[in-house]
Image: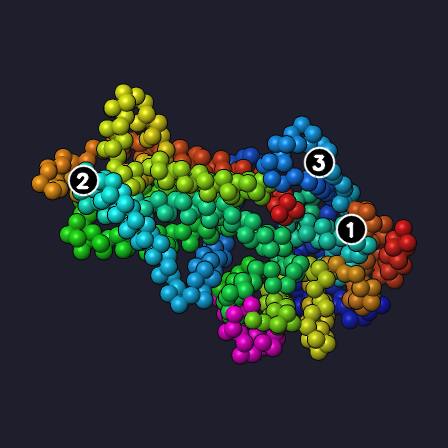
Amino acid sequence: MSNEAQRRADRLRELPFERATASFNGSFGSFVRSIREIAGQRELLGLLVRRELKARYKDSSLGFLWSLIRPLTMLVIYYVAIGQFLGAARGVPDFAIFVFAGLTIWGLYSEIVTGGTTSIIGNAGLIKKVSLPREIFPLAATGSALFNFIVQFIVLIVATIVLGQAPLSWNLLYVPASIAIVLIWGVALGLLLSAVNVYLRDVQYLVEVAMLILFWASPIVYAWSFVVDAAARSGITWLTDLYLANPVTIAVLGFQKGMWVAGSSESVIDGQTIPPQPWPADLDLRIAVMLGIGIVFAIICQRVFQKLQGNFAQEI
Amino acid sequence: MNTAMRPDIQNPPVVIRTSDVSKRFILRKDKALKERIVNFGRSQKHRSDFWALRDVAFEITAGTSVGLVGANGSGKSTMLKIIGGIIQTDTGFVERRGRVAALLELGAGFHPDLTGRENVYLNGSILGLSQKQTAEYFDSIVEFSEIGEFIDTQVKFYSSGMYVRLAFAIAVHVDPDILLVDEVLAVGDEPFQAKCMNKIREFQRDGRTIVFVSHSAPQIEDLCDRVVVLSHGRIVYDGETEGGIAALRRTFKG
């Protein structure tokens, strides 16, 4: 018995001391250390994502089908109200695919940001009692958003194939790039807002309102061509530049360009010939720039999160 | 004194080292944006601060069981959280070596909608076990908890006793070098409490280091071989148990 105790003591004597909490400093080294710590908790991250998904629909008989029913309902509403009643579908071929593509990528972004924002408060019990790299909570929210996205994405792909519009072209390369933009910006904002929300609870309500506005600030239920026309009519050309300064708008456009083949070719609706949809000039460059800025922004947000997380346990 | 049951460790190394730890709490009375704006400029009035800990310094060597005691608000739980890495210090630092497990609240991280089984894996992972290790210990965890067939029931249907029994069973399977315990030993019925105490004694025989926060003087007397008494955030006594209990009684009188 006491041999075991002695062995333990001898082993401990060889170990280096470690600080109980890493004090914050802005260096890149501490950023790398945070990333390594998070990577060390991959398993827990996976379990937390599963917990979130399982717990959400645990006692409902339709289960996770509900995560599909919502976007499909939205699709029907927008298809009927905006496409048919307001006539947007007259200028947009395959309006249903167009809208569902936009809803799918937007849903990913909005779920990451709103879910991320409340993730720290929502896990107050763990934050207060267990020492963990706290970034895993916004990341777990991202994981569950990603799962819902993948389900929707599969539905979208199946729908395009069934409708004979399978997105088989080089434009498909825009899809992973767009998802990457959404993930990077979503995670960055999720980290930042979850930390700020601990100190200022208004943030979660503000985010809800902001998401409502931002939904309409990207070409999801109306086409980019409408924006171009409106800007041309008003004569204010910088409006389109402002519109395209939104990383999610770029991601939505890229995703649509990849998934919505009808947008890139000439089509006929009700006997009228519609030219291919206009795409913003330099979309490739814009995607690259948004990815670059996004990575820098994400690093900054992680640093801010690290700075703020020191007092989470007592502020919650 | 019960040092007789302690293993003899030659030349035990220091495993926890705290250096002039101070912690200040700031209490803000306005959390919402509206109140912040309304009170802008007068914010000093709406915040007050106090020192939960002042210049706390001690070292703990491997294999000792230390009781961290004090009246309510003396800073003992805060100190335990700082050792556990949950709260940051304002000045000073805490260093430690070896695997740390903190039993600050049993079942922190249990999700009521998940089954006992699912929660064992989740909680094991939170406490630092890999999935594989949890799978290895799983039967032993269930046996220790005496949950039996209810392991596949959602934990929201558990009685509070079953809940903490399962949580305690997971926690003692983590194999820590340093165990931090905050008032969680009085769980379950009497037989289970005895089982918990046996487990703690076994931990002590294995040469694990244990830091207890407790209000119960008999428990401290029973389990600890050293007592640190805190009062208003400062150490007022640090030494053997008997003197510690007396010092604790003195702090109650003010």
Q: Are marks 1 and 2 on the same chain?
A: no
Instruction: Using the numbered discs, state the Cα–Cα distance from disc 3 to disc 2 in whole angstroms.
Output: 59 Å
- Residue position for label 3: B46
Disc nearest the viewer among 3 and 1: 3
Quarter containing the N terminus of chain A: bottom right
Disc nearest the viewer among 3 and 2: 2
Amino acid at dot 2: Arg
Instruction: Using the numbered discs, state the Cα–Cα distance from disc 3 to disc 1 in whole angstroms.
Output: 21 Å
Q: Residue furthest top?
A: A235
Q: Residue furthest left?
A: A271
Using a 10 Å C-alpha cutoff, classify the residue at mark 3 as few (fewer than 14 neighbours), some (14 to 19) or many (20 or more). Answer: some
* Front residue of B210 and A282: A282
Marks 3 & 2, CB-CB < 8 Å contact: no
Q: Which mark is residue A90?
A: 2
> Magenta stretch?
B132-156
Is residue A275 shown left or right of residue A70? left
Q: Are marks 3 and 2 on the same chain?
A: no
Instruction: Using the numbered discs, state the Cα–Cα distance from disc 1 to disc 2 in whole angstroms.
Output: 70 Å
Using a 10 Å C-alpha cutoff, classify the residue at mark 2 as few (fewer than 14 neighbours), some (14 to 19) or many (20 or more). Answer: some
The percent coordinates of residue A69 (x first, y second) are 34, 57
- Above or below, A191 relative to B253: above
Amino acid at dot 3: His
Q: Which mark is residue B73?
A: 1
Q: Residue at x 73, y 41 (%)?
A: B24
